[in-house]
Amino acid sequence: MDLLITLAVFLLCAGVGAMLAERAYQRAAAAERMSEVVHRAEDGDPLARQGPSRAAPELFERRLRFDLMRRLEQAMWQAGMYQGANSALLTIGILLAGGLAAAFLISHDWMVALGSGLGLGAAPLLYIRMKRNRRLKTFLLQLPLALDLLKSTLEAGHTLQRGMQVVEREFADPLGGEFRTAVEQARLGMPMTQALSDMLRRVPLDDLRLFVVAVKVQTEVGSSLAQIIGRLSEIVRTRQNLASQIRALTAQSRMSGMVVGLLPVVVLAMFSLIQPTYVEMLFFDETGKLILKTALVLDLGAFFLIRRILRVRF
């Protein structure tokens, strides 16, 4: 009973704290955006670098204070989840507390309870990361075709904004939605380069960054944007082909890592069905429990280490 009361008090405090932190973060972000607008108006530079004003160091300190919440909210935007970070924090707190309480009531072991709580608490973060990666991958696959269509529109004599309108009508989300947002921002008076920079913040891809830089260079220097976009489309396709070749060459190693990581679990499950007496020591003896926990930690560490080694950046 005491544990349930403690859990209820923890959830209440976590929810209130998340709501207060979200409100404070929104006030600080609004003040920071207002300072940036004033700073750009004084300098007369619409392409000034985004960031806190030099004349307002207290805003920079507030930004550092809420940096983790800002990153979480930004990751949710990149995943296509346009919600506040307080809802995600509240869900994480509920799952963490629920996992801790349930695992402790079942196993009466604080280490198992801590592992279960952290695992459940990390589930929303893993879901956001997985959805973000899937959305960015879909956007990247749509980008070369969109660049080809944009090049054809520019060669026909239309403006960049008109070409982006054609692209957002022809393509589904996420690329169509992101281009639609950029076009609406430009229609409301924001410079197109700034709208593309905001889109790059929502879709942090190197290939899209090349497109944004090309538009900025063409705006400042002046050149054939259609030729630049055509060349950029070829570069994006080359990078995608290279990524596919890398994944094909590392497929065997990745599969080997998965097999090695899952093999102890499979063997333990088989022995539990065939000869339960062989594994009873691991679950009922104190030394066996310590061995099982150590093996689990080492197995997870090796699994993530193999994934890290096989991750190729180019």
Image: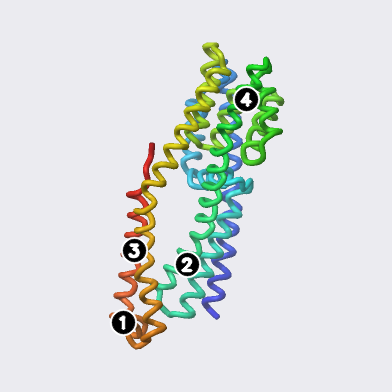
Q: Which mark is residue 181?
A: none
Q: CA distance from mark 3 to mark 1?
A: 26 Å
Vertically, is 48 above or below 246? above
SS at mark 4?
helix
| Horizontal and vertical percent position of residue 241 | 45, 37
Q: Earlier in the sequence, mark 4 or mark 1?
A: 4
SS at mark 3?
helix
Disc 1 target residue = 286
| Horizontal and vertical percent position of residue 58 | 49, 35
Asked where in the image residue 270 lies, by quadrant, the reply is: bottom left
Can residue 202 be seen by looking at this rendering? yes
In the rendered structure, are the residues bearing label 4 and label 2 in contact, judged by CB atoms less than 8 Å apart? no
Disc 3 target residue = 260
Name the side, left or right, on which 86 lies relative to 235: right
Depth order, front residue of 62/73: 73
Viewer-nearest of discs 4 and 1: 4
* Amino acid type, residue under disc 1 in the picture: Glu
Q: Which mark is residue 150?
A: 4
* Amino acid type, residue under disc 4 in the picture: Leu
| Horizontal and vertical percent position of residue 220 | 53, 13
Q: Residue furthest bottom?
A: 277
Quadrant, the N terminus: bottom right
* Amino acid type, residue under disc 3 in the picture: Val
In the rendered structure, are the residues bearing label 4 and label 1 in contact, judged by CB atoms less than 8 Å apart? no
Vertically, is 308 above or below 297? above
Name the side, left or right, on which 73 lies relative to 282: right
Depth order, front residue of 175/246: 246
Q: Earlier in the sequence, mark 4 or mark 2?
A: 2
